Image: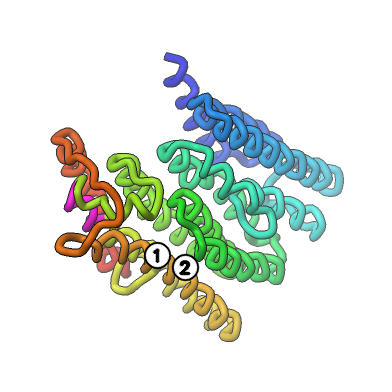
Amino acid sequence: MSTAMIFAGLILSTILATASNSWLLAWLCLELNTLSILPFISKTKHPRAIEAATKYFLTQATASCLLLLAGTSNAWLTGTWDMTQMSNKLTSTTMLIALTMKMGTVPTHFWLPEVLQGSTLLTALLISTWQKIAPMSLLFIMSNNIQPTFTLTLGLLSTTFGGWGGMNQTQLRKMMAYSSIANMGWTVITLTHEPKASMINIFTYIILTTPTFLLMALTSTKTLQNMTTMWSTSPLATTAMALLLLSTAGLPPLTGFLPKLIIMNELVTQNLTPLATMTMMTSLLTLSFYLRTTYLTTLLNPPSSATSATKWRQKMTKNKTMILLPTATTSTFMMPALIP
């Protein structure tokens, strides 16, 4: 009963935050959202889970303070709490920093890998997907008042640090955290020029990440070493996981390539071809560690030698995988349906 109430608070706070038109109401909803996710992070009663919950709380509390400061300053200058009235450059930039801190972009991204590593896979799924909807919606509302140079810089730095950070990771949750940072860079980089492209990118990422985390949780896969023996748990899940990873990396003609193509087209249209080129170069970093993970997943099957003990293939796991596969397939080959 308590879990259902907390989960209902998590959903309700996100819906109210996306529907609000006042910074004060949005701040209250984001605070409720933070308090609702904390029991899920600390549920396992492990020191790493408690540490992750503490880091998440401190980071989100700092971001909420900045958000309230920016909202109060804007209300003092303009006489209204309306989100669309962010004409002052200082208040809009402070609000951008606060919301990007909640989502985990450079330079306020250091909390995300540690929090995901200390959480369970399903909680990491919530943090990587659902918890980004409310801040992204608020950024979409105020996108007309954000400084373009600031968002372009944040986007390029996020894609670079996300790619470099994931290169040397053996823990899948940390790798997905750095992938999230890089993807948020792609989202922020076109926020002022074409906010609809940013929304397409973030929701495509959510569609791709959800079955990826669910497959990891279903097969108890947490490290790269576990990926080498994932085929023994479910061969179908292994195939779906490989396609999902390549799609998240943005490899054509899979679904994940579409938002990157739209964003590149927008940057070139705005005469930002050098920035578009640098962003594409940083995406190769993300592609490299996704290709490494895909290689370990699919190309170490028999008769190749496995480097660790294989897992038992359970009938329950097989049945759950069959239910999850349509979702994974839809999120992977949806590109023709998304092209207008």
Q: How many marks?
A: 2
Question: Magenta span covers which residues?
Answer: 234-240
Q: Tell me the residue at 56%/49% (across/down).
A: 113
In reply to whether residue 239 is colored magenta, the answer given is: yes
Q: Secondary structure at mark 2?
A: helix
Location of residue 223 in the rendering, given as x and y in whole percent from the top left corner: 40, 50
- Whether residues under marks 2 and 1 lie with C-beta atoms below 8 angstroms apart, the answer is yes
Q: Give how far apart the Cα atoms at labels 2 and 1 are.
A: 6 Å
The reply to whether residue 170 is visible in this rendering is yes
Q: On screen, 142 above or below 216?
A: below
Left or right of 297 in this view: 5: right
Q: Secondary structure at mark 1?
A: helix
Amino acid type, mark 1: Tyr
Q: Which residue is mark 1?
A: 290
Left or right of 150 in this view: 88: right
Q: Which residue is mark 2?
A: 286
